Image (cartoon, rainbow, N blue to C red):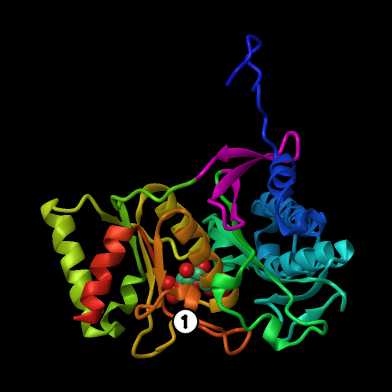
Amino acid sequence: MQTTLGIERRMMTLDRFIDEQERGFELATGEFSQILRDIVLAAKVIHREINRAGLTDILGAAGGANVHAEQVQKLDLYANELFKQSLETGGLVAALVSEEEQEPTVVNPSGRYVVVFDPLDGSSNIDVNVPVGSIFAVYRKLGSRFGPDDYLRKGSEQLAAGYVVYGSSTILVYSTGNGVNGFTLDSSIGEFVLSHPNIKIPAVSAYYSFNDAELHRFSSRLQAYIHDLRSRAATGESPIKPRYVGSLVSDFHRNLMKGGIFMYPGTSKKPEGKLRLLYECAPMAFIVEQAGGVATDGVQRLLDVRADHAHKRIPFFAGSPDEMAIVERFLKA
Ligand code: AHM
Ligand code: MG
C-alpha cells in the first residue's frame, strides 16, 4: 500500500520479518533469528563480491590471476569463508556442514543449532553470467555433544531452509515451516525487502528442466515420461517448455515461481545422481513442499530420506503437484 507521497506504507525488511516470525517460535530466545541474520550477512557480502567480479575479475572468479597479477581465491571458496566467518562470529551454532569441506566444522560446543550450506552453487556458471546461488538449512542439535547424528537427519527435521539467487536481482527465499517468502535485496539501502510474500508454486507447469545430454542414461521409465512430456508440449496439450541453465538455484527458482518440474535423476553412470542431499536437495524439497509442491528421489518423499554421510548424493525431482504426479506414475509403471 502507498501513501500520498508514494512511499511504501509497510516496508517489510527481512530483519523486521524475522523478528515478527520469531515471536512464538523456538521459545523466542533470539538465537535462531540471529543465525538467520548471520546467514543473510554472508549472502549480502557474496552478492557484493559477485557483482564486483565484472570483466576484470573473471579470471579471479575462476581462480586465476586478477588484473594486478594477484592470485585470487575461487569465488566458491571465498563464499565458504564468508558463511563460516559470519556464523563463527555469531557464535551461536554448534557446527557447520559445507559442500566445500570434507568434515563438519565445530563452532561452539554448547550451541543449539547446526547449519548446513552450499555457499555458492553452480559456480562454474559465474564467468558466463548465469545466476548462481547459496543454499542453506538449519537443524536443532539433538544431544548435549555435537556428533554425526546432529546432521545425518531427515530433511523433514529442518527448522528452516532457504536459498539466495544472485540474478538480475538478488533474492532470498526461505521458510521456517510456515509458508515461503521471498525478499529482494535493495542494495541502495543494504536491506532485503519482502517482495514475494507467501509463495505458492503454480499448479500448471510452465517449464521442465533436466540435463538433456544425460537422457540416454536415464531409466527406460523416465525416458518414457520425457517422451510423454515432449509430446504433450508439442501438441499443446500441456503448456510446458524446456528450460535448463545448469544452476540449481536458478532452475529451481524459475520453476517455483512459474510452475514446473526440475529433475536431476540417477543415471546408468551415476545411479545416485549428482546433487547432494543435505545442503542442496533437502532445503529445496522443504521449500517446494511449503509452497504447495512435491519433491521426491523418484521413489519416496525426499524429506523422509536420512543422509548417511554429509555429502550423500540423491536423485532429485521437484515441482508442481500435477506434473510430479505424472512423473511418479511413469516411474512406478
Ligand atoms: P556444483 O555443486 O558443483 O556447483 O554442481 C551443482 C550444479 C547444480 O547447480 C546444477 O543443477 C547441476 O550442477 C548441473 O549439473 P549438469 O551440468 O550435470 O547438468
Ligand atoms: Mg553445489
Give the main secondary structure, helix, strand or loop, of the magenta stretch: strand
Q: Is mark 1 within 8 Å of ligand 1?
A: no
Q: What residue is pinned by disc 1?
A: 314
Image mark count: 1
* Residue at the farthest top position: 4
In reply to whether residue 62 is colored magenta, the answer given is no
| Drawn side of residue 154 relative to residue 56, left or right | left
**SS label for mark 1:** loop
Task: Please report the residue visible at 57 percent of the width from the left and 21 percent of the height from the top.
Answer: 1
Task: Please report the residue visible at 55 percent of the width from the left and 54 percent of the height from the top.
Answer: 129
Which quadrant of the view contains residue 294? bottom left
In reply to whether residue 173 is colored magenta, the answer given is yes
| Drawn side of residue 130 relative to residue 115, left or right | left
* Residue at the farthest left position: 235
Residue type highlighted by circle 1: Ile
Where is residue 293? Give x, y as percent.
Answer: 40, 58
Regarding residue 265, the answer to whether it shows in the image is yes
User: Is 8 situated above or below 311?
Assistant: above
Where is residue 256? Give x, y as percent.
Answer: 43, 53
Where is residue 332? Give x, y as percent.
Answer: 24, 80
In this picture, which residue range is highlighted in magenta?
A: 169-198
User: Is 289 situated above or below 150?
Assistant: above
Which quadrant of the view contains residue 168? top right
Task: Please report the residue visible at 52 percent of the width from the left and 56 percent of the height from the top.
Answer: 130
Task: Please report the residue visible at 56 percent of the width from the left and 78 percent of the height from the top.
Answer: 154
Regarding residue 317, the answer to whether it shows in the image is no
Where is residue 6? Give x, y as percent.
Answer: 62, 15
Q: Nearer the viewer, residue 267 or 290?
A: 290
Quadrant of the image containing the C terminus: bottom left
User: Is 265 situated above or below 59?
Assistant: below
Disc 1 residue crowd, few under 14, some 14–19, many 20+, Cα 10 Å: many
Q: Nearer the viewer, residue 159 or 256?
A: 159
